[in-house]
Amino acid sequence: MDRKRAVEEAIHSGEMEGAYVSDEFRNDASEFARGNMSIQQLMQRAWRRNDHNVGNRSEELHAV
């Protein structure tokens, strides 16, 4: 399966499950589908966009 189809199917699947797919993610996913970023970069961007505790996590990570 090529990247474009994988992205289309993933977005469709999420929407069928009731997930909201933002324009920002759609834009990043299009860049991924065109080969302009890796899957790791796509996931990092999505994670950063949706992780509202980014500023607080360093304390949690270093508390071990």
Image (cartoon, rainbow, N blue to C red):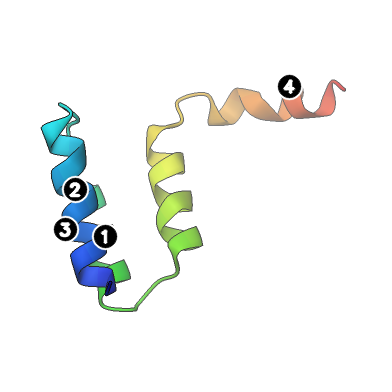
Q: Position of residue 2 (x, y in %)?
A: 27, 75
Q: Earlier in the sequence, mark 2 or mark 1?
A: 2
What kind of element bears circle 3?
helix
Q: Nearer the viewer, mark 4 or mark 1?
A: 1
Q: Which residue is mark 1?
A: 29
- The residue closer to the viewer here, 62 or 30, is 30
- The residue positioned 28% from the left and 72% from the top of the image is 1
Vertically, is 48 above or below 32?
above
Q: Which residue is mark 2?
A: 11
Which circle marks residue 60 in the picture? 4
> Is the C-beta separation of discs 2 and 3 under 8 Å?
yes
Q: How many marks?
A: 4
Vertically, is 41 above or below 47?
below
Q: Earlier in the sequence, mark 3 or mark 1?
A: 3
Which circle marks residue 8 in the picture? 3
Q: Nearer the viewer, mark 2 or mark 1?
A: 2
User: Among all residues in the image, which is located at the extreme front?
Assistant: 1
- The residue closer to the viewer here, 49 or 14, is 14
Q: Would you say residue 22 is visible in this rendering?
A: no
